[in-house]
Amino acid sequence: MSAGTMRRLYVAMAMLVLIGMTVVTIRQMGWRINLTESEPLGLYRMGPLRPGSLIMRGSQVEFCPPDAVTPERFPFYLRGNCPNGGMPMFKTVVGIPGDVVEIGHTEFKVNHRQFPYSGQMERSRQYFWVVLPHQSGTVTLGPHQYWVYGSGARPEQAAQSFDSRYWGPIQEKQVLQVASTRK
């Protein structure tokens, strides 16, 4: 290899290391960069869920989904450090303890309020062979249960979010962090 090629290779490697270190530093400082389409794109300030603090309707949370949701079963779900082997997810809480959630194939409602683009998909669009599970019926959220929904970077993207519509409520103990602000 020529000296010029080696120099470009070293610069590229240094840039990748710098980007990686920046991402790790941002994460350690309590910030989360959301690049998924499940929630509005942006930078979110995250904080741990402290004992006695409330998760409210509209809170954006980072959580580990139920154990049945695995990267092996759903190949679009990336690997990570959750107990199920996947990455933490980031969604909006739309149902809190005591709320009544009505789930149908074409819509879901919380306390009779219908959410836009809330129908369930039969299959993943990218992984068409993956049949998605469906929830149906009426659920009253118990103590420490929450219904999460990907509100979408754009409203129509909410229809494609993999959230409680497919696996049901999450437990408070699954919540890792709560967003306090978005920049």
Image (cartoon, rainbow, N blue to C red):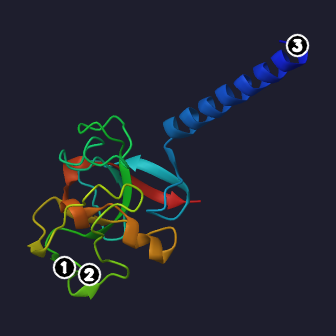
The numbered disc on residue 104 is 1
Badge 3 local density, few (<14 within 10 Å), some, or many (20+)? few
Label 3 to label 2, Cα distance in Å?
Answer: 61 Å
Q: What amino acid is found at the position of numbered circle 2 in the picture?
A: Glu
Residue placed most toward the observer, 179 or 112: 112
Label 2 to label 1, Cα distance in Å?
Answer: 5 Å
Mark 2: which secondary structure?
Answer: loop
The numbered disc on residue 69 is none
Q: What amino acid is found at the position of numbered circle 3 in the picture?
A: Ser
Residue beneath the point at 35% across and 59% down:
128
Q: Position of residue 154 (x, y in %)?
A: 51, 73
Badge 2 local density, few (<14 within 10 Å), some, or many (20+)? some
In screen coordinates, is 89 left or right of 30?
left
Residue 140 sits in quarter: bottom left
- On screen, 156 above or below 1? below
Mark 3: which secondary structure?
Answer: loop
- Marked residue nearer the N-terminal end (3 or 1): 3
Residue placed most toward the observer, 143 or 104: 104
Is the Cβ of the residue at disc 2 closer than 8 Å to that at disc 1?
yes
Residue pointed to by mark 2: 107
Q: Nearer the viewer, mark 3 or mark 1?
A: 3
Residue pointed to by mark 3: 2
Q: What amino acid is found at the position of numbered circle 1 in the picture?
A: Gly
Label 3 to label 1, Cα distance in Å?
Answer: 63 Å
Residue beneath the point at 35% across and 60% down:
124
Q: Position of residue 90 (x, y in %)?
A: 39, 55
In screen coordinates, is 130 left or right of 1?
left
Q: Position of residue 159 (x, y in %)?
A: 38, 72
In screen coordinates, is 4 left or right of 80?
right
- Marked residue nearer the N-terminal end (3 or 2): 3
